[in-house]
Image: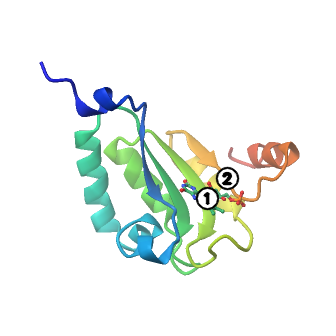
Amino acid sequence: MRRAWWKTLGYDAVDINLGCPAKKVVKCGGSGLLRELPLLEDIFKSVRAAVKIPLTIKLRAGWDDKSIVALEVVKMAEQVGIEAAAIHPRTRAQGYTGKADWNIIAAVKQAVKIPVIGNGDVQSPEDAVRLGERDGM
Ligand SMILES: Cc1cc2nc3c(=O)[nH]c(=O)nc-3n(C[C@H](O)[C@H](O)[C@H](O)COP(=O)(O)O)c2cc1C
């Protein structure tokens, strides 16, 4: 019998990157998909159906501060059977600057059962502890 391709290649998991802010990437993927939730849901369903190993997502908070969609996207991911979500709580508009909004990580963590990985502005072990001690984490 033919071995499934993901076993042949030796991968342990597949992560869908919804974080990349690069101009050439947002045209066809990365954080650009946070503006197209119906399409994103179709992608989640298709990839979930095709991949038997753990499937995770990494996402930004949203496209800009008027369209924060992290909660909606992670709930959708959970419904589709995605196994964990890593949140970088900056918007695409922020790029790599400005403050990471840890409130977004906490709000998502409270709303879903799948593991939520938070990051952004964690520059020391103390920062990591402070993030973990937020209400709802
Ligand atoms: C130059 C650069 C490239 C990055 N590339 C990726 C990537 O390919 N995939 C990914 O999940 N995160 C990527 N990140 C995001 C980081 O993993 C992380 O989410 C973010 O930097 C956390 O915020 P912080 O810089 O405030 O700690 C990148 C970050 C930087 C600065």
Where on the picture, by quarter, is residue 56?
A: top left
* 76 is higher (above) or lower (below) than 133: below
Identify the residue at horizontal 57%, vertical 44% (top origin). 116
Q: What x and y, as percent, mark residue 41?
A: 30, 58
Query: Regarding mark 1 in the picture, which secondary structure is present there?
Result: strand
Identify the residue at horizontal 85%, vertical 48% (top origin). 124
Question: Within 10 angstroms of label 1, few (less than 14), some, or many (20 or more) residues?
Answer: many
Q: Nearer the viewer, residue 78 or 28?
A: 28
Query: Regarding mark 2 in the picture, which secondary structure is present there?
Result: loop
Q: Nearer the viewer, residue 109 or 48?
A: 48
Disc with the residue nearer the chain's start (1 vs 2): 1
Determine which residue is flagged by label 1.
88
Give the amino acid at mark 1.
Answer: His
Give the quarter the ligand 1 occupies: bottom right
Q: What x and y, as percent, mark residue 122?
A: 77, 53
Q: Is mark 1 within 8 Å of ligand 1?
A: yes
Give the amino acid at mark 2.
Answer: Asn
Determine which residue is flagged by label 2.
119
Tell me the quadrant of the picture where the N terminus can be found: top left
Identify the residue at horizontal 55%, vertical 73% (top origin). 92
Q: Is residue 66 left or right of residue 53?
A: right
Q: Are marks 1 and 2 in contact (CB under 8 Å)?
A: yes
Residue farthest to the left, as pictured:
1
Question: Within 10 angstroms of label 2, few (less than 14), some, or many (20 or more) residues?
Answer: some
Tell me the quadrant of the picture where the C terminus can be found: top right
